[in-house]
Amino acid sequence: MMFRTLDMALVAIMIAAAAMTYKIKHDSEDRLAEIRKLRIAIQQEKDSVELLRADWSLLTQPARLQKLAERYAKDLQLQPLGARAIVGADELPTREQGIEDIINSQGGIMVKRGDATDPTTTGGTGQ
């Protein structure tokens, strides 16, 4: 019995479909392997960050820093913080402008607490 043209075309389509299926499967396995490698790399980076945070915590402990400051006091020429180094609120420089001046210079509207309506446009429907 001879193959007809339609039969040969169907066989060709089946072979092409099988080849395409194999290629898609192979590509997906490659991508899956790449994803696994990336997940491992990400986990290693997370572990490194965790380790670095632990190191930073250890290195910045106040007791350790105090010992180092005492040990290298001559080299660093550190001096203790005096009570005069901290200023009070009255010693801070005064502002040139008040908050009302800043708001008015920017075109804003300042509403007093006693006002019942707020003239500021907000985009609401007003209901």
Image: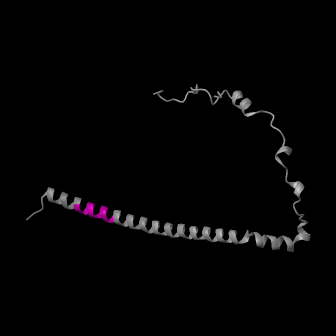
**What colouring style does the render use?**
one colour
Q: Residue at x 15, y 59 (%)?
A: 7
Residue 33 lies left or right of residue 111; in this view the side is left
Residue 56 position within the rendered picture, expressed as x and y whole percent measured from the top left: 69, 68
18 falls in the magenta region: yes
Q: Main secondary structure of the magenta part?
A: helix
Q: Residue at x 23, y 58 (%)?
A: 13
Q: Residue at x 32, y 66 (%)?
A: 22
55 falls in the magenta region: no
Frontmost residue, 50 versus 9: 50
Q: Residue at x 73, y 70 (%)?
A: 61
Q: Is residue 123 above or below residue 84?
A: above
Frontmost residue, 35 versus 88: 88
Frontmost residue, 88 versus 27: 88
Q: Which residues are magenta?
A: 14-22
Q: Which quarter of the rendering shows the C terminus? A: top left
Residue 119 lies left or right of residue 32; in this view the side is right
Residue 82 position within the rendered picture, expressed as x and y whole percent measured from the top left: 89, 59
Residue 105 position within the rendered picture, expressed as x and y whole percent measured from the top left: 71, 28
Q: Is residue 123 above or below residue 30?
A: above
Residue 85 position within the rendered picture, expressed as x and y whole percent measured from the top left: 87, 55
Q: Quadrant of residue 66?
A: bottom right
